[in-house]
Amino acid sequence: MVKAKITGLSVTDVRFPTSMEHHGSDAMHTDPDYSAAYVVLETDSCDGLKGYGLTFTLGKGTEVVVSAVKALSRLVVGRIFRDVVENFSGFYRELTSDGQLRWIGPEKGAVHLATAAVLNAVWDLWAKKLRKPLWKLLVDMTPEQLVSCIDFRYISDALTDEEALEILRNGRQEGEIREQYMLQNGYPAYTTSCAWLGYPDEQLEKLCTEAIKEGWTRFKVKVGADLIDDYRRCKLIRNLIGSERTLLLDANQRWEIDEAISWVKELAEFKPLWIEEPTSPDDILGHAAISKALEPLGIGVATGEQCHNRVMFKQFLQARALQYLQIDSCRLGSVNENLSVLLMAKKFNIPVCPHAGGVGLCELVQHLIIFDYISVSGSLENRMCEYVDHLHEHFKYPVVIQNAAYMPPKDPGYSTEMIVESVLQHQYPDGEVWQKLALEKEEL
């Protein structure tokens, strides 16, 4: 690899007014504007390639993450790119261990979201330089190369580097067969687009009916604000999708422990596979209590989209506090930290069912879950990846869904690059879209 230098880092606050039509609405986040802190890395290499990364937010507060990205930029700009990727775990630790910035984490919150955006851009650039989609870059790396990207600090009591190497070496067996399966069939997905909490019944019926015609067999319903309304909506959707299809519930952290148990028991007749984020995402023992109480009903607990870091995932696994683990490509510290969580999930024999949707999350996480199947888990049992049909048109390499499955991307990179015009129109607050909305508000 030529000794290219990272010569610049820019970051843009990009927001989409999704709250106007209640897209993304749930019991805790009633008016989200899907947004991203969007990072572009420039280099002095003759090929002119750039790296694109992002982290997902809900509108307000994106400017905080943008500021955190700018604070991290001094650790990135001026670095020789080859030096970064050849000592990737060291670079990761450098970003997460700055003596002053670490205080406002550590490895969580806005500063960790910013770290994810920067590192996502690094991985995108690396995959482009090797002319491979990111999932293929990961699949083609040796176990030793993959392990060298992981910071094992704080998790070695649950996963050592030797254990990680063994898992990855075992994963190479029949990996080519699984890769061909992915290329032909894709990775199974479930849809959240049909049942946002703010949608009226007519819209639920219309969207579910259309999704069934398109071949969807797994449906997630947002719950948690009102039990009577949840019961009615779950009954409506179960009747629409029939008994043979899968129903999933998501409370988005709304409940207390006892409340979560009693609420889900009231909805148990609709046979949900899991309840997602039933309580505070930080309450590991609370999740364990809920898991134990719901086990006799055959209802699992899923969580992870707001799990701060690999340490929390370690403890969730050790406490047997979840039955479905949901990684997030933009909350954890990019691919590096997600690798460690995928490997821990394999060791603890817990299926990974990633969080996606938002702005770009589907584009990113497809690479991770395809790699997980080919090189780590080797299984599709009880596994599926979330899909939300919003905002893909703003990406240069949008996801491709066929027969309710993610088809492996073929373009080089991490699928993170947005269309320039979309960024210009939706940058906040000066983009055309936001200027127009501000003017309309003034006229009212």
Image (tube, rainbow, N blue to C red):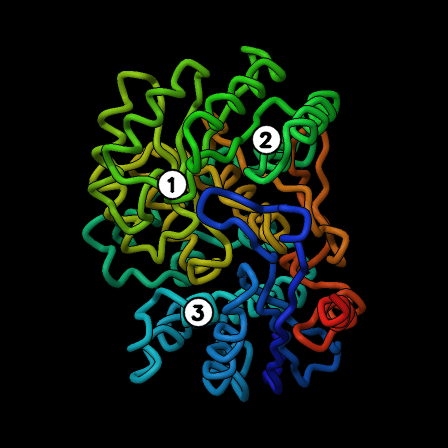
Residue type of the residue flagged with mark 3 = Phe
Residue 29 placement, left or right of 159: right
Callout 3: helix, strand or loop? helix
Residue type of the residue flagged with mark 1 = Glu
168 above or below 234? below
Disc number for residue 188: 2
- Give the Cα separation between the discs numbered 2 and 1: 21 Å
Residue type of the residue flagged with mark 2 = Pro
Disc number for residue 88: 3
Residue 171 placement, left or right of 368: left
Callout 1: helix, strand or loop? loop
Q: Which residue is mark 1?
A: 277
Residue 244 placement, left or right of 276: right
- Give the Cα separation between the discs numbered 3 and 1: 32 Å
Residue drawn 47% across the image and 37% down it? 353
- Give the Cα separation between the discs numbered 3 and 2: 31 Å
Residue drawn 53% across the image and 31% down it? 220
Quadrant location, the C terminus: bottom right
Q: Residue 152, image x and y in percent?
A: 29, 60
Reading the chain from its start, which is encountered first: label 3 or label 1?
3
Q: Residue 253, image x and y in percent?
A: 37, 44
Res 180 visible: no
Q: Residue 82, image x and y in percent?
A: 54, 76
- Looking at the rendered image, the disc whose residue lies closer to the viewer, 3 or 2, is 2
